[in-house]
């Protein structure tokens, strides 16, 4: 394998690793946002903490129409 081929493969691997880090960062940001939204929902509407998820979804869709 030539030196140029090795460098190309290494560059590709570095790119893939950077993309994987970005995906992890985006996933963690989304998870944090969802947790914060859930906390706000429970604070604004305390019964949400004990409601069945389907009932909560139906309630929110009905209420926010």
Image (tube, helix red, strand yellow):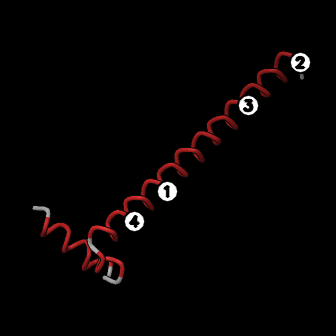
Q: Is residue 52 above or below residue 45?
A: below
| Dot label at residue 2 | 2
Return the disc, 4 or 1, that comes first in the chain's sequence.
1
Q: CA distance from mark 4 to mark 1?
A: 12 Å
Q: Are marks 2 and 3 in contact (CB under 8 Å)?
A: no
| Closer to the eye: label 3 or 1 | 1
**Based on the displayed image, in which of its 4 quarters is residue 55 positioned?**
bottom left
Residue at left 36%, top 78%? 49
| Dot label at residue 12 | none
Q: Position of residue 29 (x, y in %)?
A: 51, 48
Return the disc, 2 or 1, that comes first in the chain's sequence.
2
Q: Secondary structure at mark 3?
A: helix
Return the disc, 2 or 4, that comes first in the chain's sequence.
2
Return the disc, 3 or 4, that comes first in the chain's sequence.
3
Q: Is residue 59 above or below residue 23?
A: below
Q: Is residue 14 above or below residue 57?
A: above
Task: From the viewer's perspective, tell me whether residue 22 is left or right of residue 55.
Answer: right
| Residue under numbered circle 4 | 39
Return the disc, 3 or 1, that comes first in the chain's sequence.
3
Q: CA distance from mark 2 to mark 3?
A: 19 Å
Task: From the viewer's perspective, tell me whether residue 20 is left or right of residue 60.
Answer: right
| Residue under numbered circle 1 | 31
Q: Secondary structure at mark 1?
A: helix
| Residue under numbered circle 3 | 14
């Amino acid at each position: 394998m030539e030196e140029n081929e090795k460098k190309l493969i290494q560059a590709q691997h570095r790119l893939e690793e950077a993309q994987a880090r970005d995906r992890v960062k985006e996933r963690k940001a989304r998870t944090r946002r969802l947790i914060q939204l859930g906390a706000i929902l429970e604070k604004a509407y305390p019964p949400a903490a004990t409601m069945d998820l389907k009932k909560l979804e139906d309630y929110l869709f009905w209420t926010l129409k």
